[in-house]
Amino acid sequence: MNDDGKNASSEGYFVLLGFSNWPHLEVVLFVVILIFYLMTLIGNLFIMILSYLDAHLHTPMYFFLSNLSFLDLCYTTSSIPQLLVNLWGPEKTISYIGCMIQLYFSLALGTTECVLLVVMSYDRYAAVCRPLHYAVLMNPRFCHLLAAASWVSGFTTSALHSSFTFWVPLCGHRQMDHFFCEVPALLRLSCVDTSVNELTLLIMSSIFVLIPLILILSSYGAVARAVLRMKSTTGLQRAFGTCGAHLMVVSLFFIPVICVYLQPPSGKSQDQGKFIALFYTVVTPSLNPLIYTLRNKDVRGAVWRLIGKKRPLHS
């Protein structure tokens, strides 16, 4: 193979072009993304610590929410620090090994989140539609098994798919028009036919995006029917509050992911793909804690107990 046909692995790095087409925006993006990243760290750590410290939050809902918070922390950390470094300095490179690791973890954590959101919707279905059997259905052992299944499915799937992606010959191309290593961006660098990889991506995305979304919507269809039959106004408000928050999180995660992964890499503009990816890697994880804790009486009560004060009557 001549010099022009070298693979990026022999060169040892990729150039992440990111948002270099808009150099005047890079400082603004750095500040905005840093703020969102700090919000993600603080908000998700807050949920994890509070759920651990307060015995009243030792319930299946908050156990899964703590898993989601840890997942969001890991997911953003897999790409955002690298993006901040690239936005701040002139160097916009990532090592080949670093790119492989980033691709593996972003795929693994993204897939895990798809499955975990299904688990959380089942928990809400059991709480609202099967309240008398809820404690038996969602016993601690079963909850731990569901959480473990989410993580194992994500990391196993990613091992298969990311290794398949890195087998594609890149033929010397090192400039990736993205801010992190993602499958569609890597496939664009190939100088061979990637239709098999694109088909594999479409199939995997259908399994881990569309099927979870259908299951979630089915769960909430059953929840909506049960809620509408409720005679208690308090029960109605509580059910809509917890389920509405979860549906909002589902929408913020699944809609942009569908836009990126359920069409071929050539099917959309690269700039559009970057900004959509920026939304679900930066914005969504920072909003999840706010959505779940805003107007949440359980969380407010836990905070008051933690600081050793009685909860005000109006809360």
Image (spheres, rainbow, N blue to C red):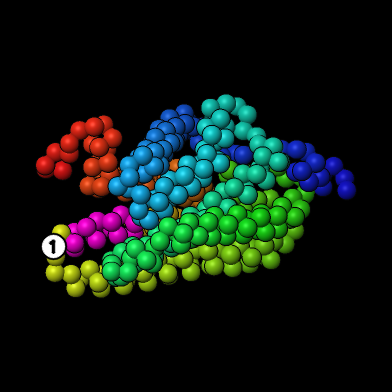
Q: Which image quarter is the C terminus in?
A: top left
Which of the 4 image quadrants contains residue 231?
Answer: bottom left
Residue in the image at 44% along x and 32% along y: 34
Whether the magenta-drawn stretch holds residue 80 is answered as no
Residue most extreme to the left: 313
- Residue range in magenta is 235-247
Residue most extreme to the top: 89
Of helix, strand and loop, which one carries label 1?
helix
Residue 19 appears at what percent x and percent y? 53, 38
Q: Is residue 278 visible?
A: no
Whether the magenta-drawn stretch holds residue 246 is answered as yes
Dominant secondary structure of the residues highlighted in magenta in the image: helix
Which of the 4 image quadrants contains residue 155?
Answer: bottom right
Left or right: residue 199 versus residue 271 is right
User: Callout 1, which amino acid?
Assistant: Thr
Residue in the image at 75% along x and 55% along y: 167
Residue in the image at 22% along x and 47% along y: 297
Residue named by callout 1: 233
- Nearer to me, 265 or 207: 207
Q: Is residue 38 visible?
A: yes
Residue 116 appears at what percent x and percent y? 46, 58
- Nearer to me, 20 or 154: 154
Q: Is residue 185 above or below residue 267?
A: above
Q: Is residue 256 above or below residue 213?
A: above
- Nearer to me, 17 or 143: 143
